Image (cartoon, grey):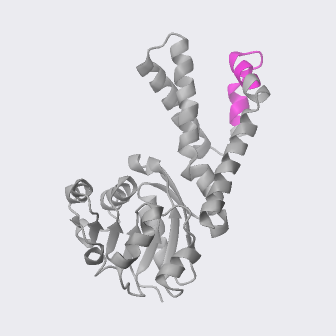
């Protein structure tokens, strides 16, 4: 039987850990006094303290009296962290955002009866528009899972997926911001080449990508149809679209995502 989650610890207060903490506090998911952060770095602990959250250098102290632990360290730090964590109560929900670490791997460390939730967030969480894929093992109750979804929805959107989809989630949303930055950067360079100053080009490019993404999220029209709607017959847009189609734009993107997915599978082995 799942318990309700009243207290949470966040281990690792770097970019992602900090973003999670910020979302939880500002979203009112849990009060600041019900949270504790752990990080060796003074600078990182100060982030938490600014939010009114107690932060300590010692992991075992942070997690000693908590219902939920979020592991927000680098994947390669997991091995070193295990002895610091020590004995963890079986009732505690362990949430891992460690890229490539499978639920079965985490069960290897924490036991088959441990409650494990695996999450793939992304860096736009830092500005409150993250996208997270979430899966769990059989020990996690629906109530516990919905709390985790609520936490990761506090800085963007969060969706429950099957663990078998975590590699493609990595390919689309986990690593995806980098592809979009390349696209925006190319638009900026084209803007500058066309006589714009850099600041204007950046605004026109980034706001356009943001707006197009909102259109896709807010409307029931397919992206394909939205594209057609911008292309007036014999107009300017169709000329640009024709070049992107001829140069294999879609194919390049699909291949890139597949390469990322493959690497994610290898890392999970």
Q: Is residue 250 above or below residue 160?
A: above
Q: What is the magenta segment's predominant secondary structure?
A: helix
Q: Nearer the viewer, residue 73 or 197?
A: 73
Tell how many labels. Answer: 0
- In x, y percent, where is residue 147? 44, 71
Looking at this rendering, what residue extends furthest in the front direction? 80
Looking at this rendering, what residue extends furthest in the top direction? 195
Magenta highlight on residue 188: no
- In x, y percent, where is residue 117? 51, 73
Q: Residue at x 35, y 67 (%)?
A: 11
Image quadrant occupied by the C terminus = bottom right
Q: Is residue 150 above or below residue 142?
A: above
Q: For residue 159, what is the image quadrant?
A: bottom right
Q: Nearer the viewer, residue 128 or 186?
A: 186
Q: For residue 31, what is the image quadrant?
A: bottom left
Q: Is residue 155 above or below residue 76?
A: above
Magenta highlight on residue 235: yes
Q: Is residue 169 above or below residue 55?
A: above
- In x, y percent, where is residue 44? 27, 56
Left or right of 249 on screen, residue 191: left
Q: Nearer the viewer, residue 174 or 129?
A: 174
- In x, y percent, where is residue 154? 41, 58
Q: For residue 167, what is the image quadrant?
A: bottom right
Q: Residue at x 68, y 55 (%)?
A: 262
Looking at this rendering, what residue extends furthest in the right direction? 246
Q: Residue at x 44, y 19 (%)?
A: 198
What's the magenta region?
Answer: 225-242
Residue 219 appears in view: yes
Q: Nearer the viewer, residue 190 or 224?
A: 190
Left or right of 253 on screen, residue 125: left
């Amino acid at each position: 039987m799942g318990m309700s989650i009243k207290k949470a610890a966040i281990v690792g207060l770097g970019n992602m850990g900090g973003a999670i903490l910020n979302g939880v506090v500002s979203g009112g998911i849990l009060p600041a006094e019900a949270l504790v952060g752990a990080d060796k770095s003074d600078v990182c602990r100060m982030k938490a303290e600014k939010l009114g959250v107690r932060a300590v250098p010692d992991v075992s102290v942070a997690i000693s009296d908590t219902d939920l632990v979020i592991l927000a360290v680098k994947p390669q730090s997991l091995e070193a962290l295990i002895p610091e964590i020590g004995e963890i109560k079986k009732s505690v929900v362990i949430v891992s955002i460690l890229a490539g670490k499978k639920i079965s791997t985490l069960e290897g460390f924490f036991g088959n009866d441990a409650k494990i939730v695996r999450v793939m967030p992304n860096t736009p969480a830092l500005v409150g528009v993250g996208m997270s894929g979430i899966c769990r093992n059989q020990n996690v109750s629906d109530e516990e899972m919905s709390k985790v979804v609520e936490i990761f929805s506090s800085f963007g959107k969060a969706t429950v997926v099957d663990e078998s989809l975590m590699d493609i989630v990595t390919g689309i949303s986990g690593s995806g911001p980098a592809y979009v930055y390349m696209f925006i950067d190319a638009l900026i360079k084209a803007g500058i080449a066309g006589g714009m100053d850099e600041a204007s080009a950046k605004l026109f490019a980034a706001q356009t990508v943001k707006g197009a993404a909102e259109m896709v999220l807010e409307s029931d029209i397919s992206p394909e149809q939205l594209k057609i709607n911008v292309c007036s017959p014999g107009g300017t847009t169709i000329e640009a679209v024709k070049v992107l189609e001829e140069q294999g734009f879609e194919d390049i993107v699909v291949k890139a995502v597949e390469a990322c997915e493959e690497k994610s599978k290898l890392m999970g082995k």
